Amino acid sequence: MIGEEILYQSVTELGQQIREKKLSPVDLTKAYLERSEKLGPRLNAYATLTRDLALKQAGEAEKEIDAGKYRGPLHGIPYAAKDLLAVPGYPTTWGAKPFANQKFDFAARVIEKLNEAGAILIGKAAMIELAGGMGYRFASASATGPAKNPWNTGCWTCGSSSGSGAIVAGALAAFAIGTETWGSIICPSAFCGIAGLRPTFGRVSRYGAMALSYSMDKIGPMARSAEDCEIILQAISGYDRRDKGSLPNEQAQFAKTTTGNSRPLRLGVVKKPFGDFNPGADVKRQFDEAVAVMRRAGATVAEVELPEGPFETAAGVIISVEGAAAFRELIESGRISEINDPLGKVGAYVSTTIPGDDFLRAMQIRSVFQLKADDLFGNFDVITSPSLPMGASTLDTNLETGLSFPDPVGGLGNLCGLPAISVPCGFTDQKLPIGIQFVGRVLEDEKVLRAAKLFQQNTQWHKKHPPLGA
């Protein structure tokens, strides 16, 4: 009988036991499936469980490992994939009722890469409809209902990768794949007390993934620790000619670093990370302590100011215009009215009215800020701020009023394709997780991971898990 203490172990820990044949991939998969079948509906965590596929893959993995054909650290590890990634034989609903019966006869490249690594797909994670690209006001903007936070099921998990956050935090799988256009990996990772990595734009192929914003969509891992995210990124990164935004392989392929760096990490603490919006006192207190941990661990710390300018507005214009183009048929047919959220039903049409010269101006602004972002890291390896200024919002919160704040760190990072990671750094006064994020220069994902790993080597927050019960 595999207990909860095993299911909450990291990919690194599970992989070592599987490699040493102390843990059966079949038994592990069955345990995650049983927990997912029991708790998944309670959390609205899944769109679909892929039980038959999972058991088939687990059996194959076990036979290969027993025969000495070990593929690597993800071999035999169960995971979930956000339901905008194509998996043949199963629905890929994009979280939206108009696509409830949509199926593809091919796999997304990320799924192919994880198959090659020997990972086991146990389900498609629930998500916000159309990844929130038309706008949304409520956590219920999903065909599967609002994803519930394992730390408090009266609270939301945040972002369009909402089910992925619930699955990892609730130990329904060892890791999950999420996507981010603006905030949808960082936000649920912070709300759910897990690690979530947004890789450099173009590092992970988006072939077979739902398109929202061609020039801003990114795919990344959500897991127990930064070390796990590093292992997963190594498996899923690389050039793919089918994704025109894919970087050349020498840049796209991420190699896990094995040697240490003797130079102290240079950490820039962002001034006014949420503009004039002040984070909660509990968030500020925990973040300040997290920075102190980094200083005690040897990092040099100084304040840094983000460049001024309308980069948040530019990012919003690009997402709106590219989203309207991606869903033109859905909008023009009128079937956009079938989605759940009232704002999305209207926002889709508003997006179609944005003038072309506004879009061109936003693209020009991006070019300027990509240079400014590069300059930002002249004196720093990474910059840091709280991932969010508060803990998880309640399920009935109107997000336009109750979860609305400036997000210059997220705006600049996503507009310019910068890598970032959120890891847990404490709890609010209401005992909800708080995240700290580290952001790096384009292609310097290893520095982002180095910072997060250094923090987790000196803290235990990532080893906490919610009192969810079996």
Image (cartoon, rainbow, N blue to C red):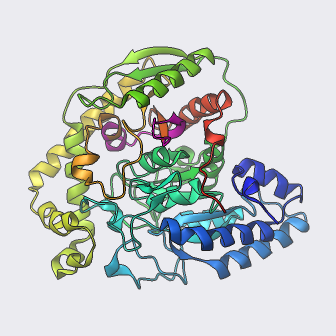
Residue 74 visible in the snapshot = yes
Q: Quadrant of the rendered structure where residue 65 is? A: bottom right
Instruction: Confirm whether the magenta stretch covers residue 384.
Output: no
Residue 73 in view of the camera:
no
User: Residue 391, position in %: x, y?
Assistant: 41, 42
The quarter of the displayed image where residue 272 is located: top left
The x, y position of residue 278, in whole percent, is 29, 29
Q: Report the residue at 26% width, 39% height from top.
A: 405
Location of residue 173 by image quarter: bottom right
Q: Residue at x 63, y 69 (%)?
A: 121
- Using residue 100 as the reference point, say whether residue 354 is left or right of it: left
Q: Is residue 421 magenta?
A: yes
User: Residue 276, how many percent across, how many down?
Assistant: 23, 28
Residue segment shown in magenta: 411-432
Q: Quadrant of the C terminus?
A: bottom right
How far across and how far down the image is residue 119, in percent? Answer: 69, 64
